[in-house]
Amino acid sequence: MLVYNSQAHRKQEFTTIEPGKVRMYVCGPTVYDQIHIGNARTFLSFDVIRRYLMYKGYEVTFAQNLTDVDDKIINRANEQGRTASEVAEEFSAAFIEQMHRFNVMDPDIRPRATREIEAMQEMILTLIDNGNAYAVPSGDVYFSVRSDSSYGILSGRDLDQLRAGERVEVNDEKRDPFDFALWKAAKPGEPSWPSPWGEGRPGWHTECCAMIHRHLGTPIDIHGGGADLIFPHHENETAQAMCAWHAPLANYWMHGGMLQINEEKMSKSLGNFYTLKEVLDRYSANAVRLLMLQTHYRAPLDFSFDRLDGAVSSLDRLLNCVKNLRWAADNAPQDGEFSDLDRSFAGAIDAARADFVAQMDDDFNTAGGVAAIFGLANAANKYLADAGENITTSVTLRAADTLCELADVLGINLADASAGSELPAELVALAAQHAGYEGTSPDEAAEALLAARQAARKERNWAVADAIRDAVTALGLVIEDTAAGARLRLAK
């Protein structure tokens, strides 16, 4: 398996620290508002990476933090006349809710910054003792960037080529403008905790490093996040780890590409800013995931609602393919001899799975994985058309199971298609009128109506056949004629 390592700037063979086990950390949100779809794309990407590692048999321990103390949270609380903890609690719950809606798996470990203060202070004390950090009279504590000879190893940045004040905070108390805060002295009205340097709170770059070391140990196998975190956040994290514990923070650094809206940067000022909640209120999680996964996780993703509508149609193709396979298997005559067509289709199933694995083994290429799934769906549709009534149940069900299995690795649920869609109760009265049905089951009523229509067509009684068709159409259903017979399904 090849993984692109941002630190090495190339793909590398994936080798875990412990055989068969993966320790993985992904930076979580700062909880001051609903997350936007750019955030969601990052969390989706690493959810799929985690799922695929599990699919390959790895025992994965996945941690993701919640930053529940930060300037943004404090500012939002002041704007609303609330406490920072109230804001953080509200949007922590909102984030978890939206991840559940998006079918993102819960982390095994979800540390919150406000509950990890002791671990952060211990790390800061170690950095001071090692000569890599210093306290100033105000009560702030800073990391001395130039004390780390390897600083820039992740991002490739050369401090001497960067202008002072560019992407760094200029402060007269700093020994160097590039030094960053490990601990911030308390200001009136802000949340704070006691420390050896006075009341204060941790700096943003401090949190993840200390939490990773405490909960997973260092180094870990994979550290992930959006590409915008490479510098300075992840650069500062790895610098702290190297100086505190004389070991890398992670062996593989992975970063997802940015999301654009109609080829423009997403921005509230441009009116193209969308939260995940807004999108999931209009579209299914399956459709949004399918759209996002058609682009490699490291590449920029162009998001548009036209493309999302296209993903809805593509998802319907997959769902209908699984439904058709299941239905055909349920309604096919008893299996006969395994034919050349069956053998060819069985080979296509095996080839699709092999192609899916090969694509995903190449730096989690979900775009290729999605293409492999659709390739199998196309082969399945052709098989159903070519086989006619000579469908072999075993190979047909295996194709449906394989489609569901591979889609599930991507967190896309096709399994519900096996149950079909619930038919409306009004079919019972319709079947009583047109087919003399006397029961109460919509499924049995559907069978009676289809049988009555088939009989009318055989007798060339087109008026009756058309009346049945028009009646079910009025209920939002369509009659679908297949090689294995007719069936009713909900119209799109």
Image: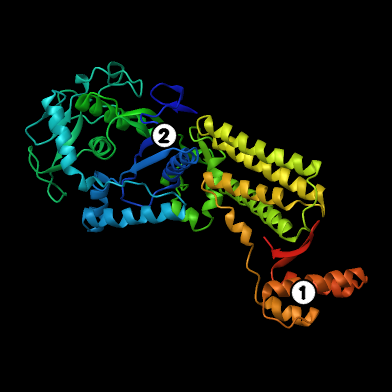
Considering every residue shown, the one lying at the far front of the view is: 337
Q: Residue at x 54, y 47 (%)?
A: 408
Q: Amino acid at mark 2?
A: Gly
**Residue closest to the eye, 338 or 64:** 338
In the drawing, does residue 352 fall left or right of residue 485?
Answer: left
Q: Residue at x 49, y 55 (%)?
A: 280
Disc nearest the viewer among 1 and 2: 2
Q: Quadrant of residue 371?
A: top right
The mark nearer the N terminus, 1 or 2, is 2
Measured from the top left, where is residue 442 in percent x and y? 68, 74
Name the residue beneath numbered marker 2.
20
* Colouring method of the image: rainbow
Name the residue beneath numbered marker 1.
448
Q: Amino acid at mark 1?
A: Ala
Q: Quadrant of residue 128?
A: top left
Q: Is residue 93 above or below residue 352?
A: below
- Residue 307: tell me if it is visible: yes
Measured from the top left, where is residue 275 in percent x and y? 43, 51
Q: Residue at x 76, y 80 (%)?
A: 437
Q: Residues within 10 Å of mark 2 (few under 14, many from 20)?
A: some
**Residue closest to the eye, 134 or 293:** 293
Q: Residues within 10 Å of mark 1 (few under 14, many from 20)?
A: many
Q: Residue at x 21, y 56 (%)?
A: 83
Q: Quadrant of the C terminus?
A: bottom right
Q: Evaluate if marks 1 and 2 touch, with contact meaning CB atoms under 8 Å apart.
A: no
In the drawing, does residue 8 fall left or right of residue 131?
Answer: right
As helix, strand or loop, the secondary structure at mark 1 comes to helix
Mark 1 → mark 2, Cα distance in angstroms: 55 Å
Measured from the top left, where is residue 313 in percent x and y? 64, 51
Considering every residue shown, the one lying at the far right of the view is: 460
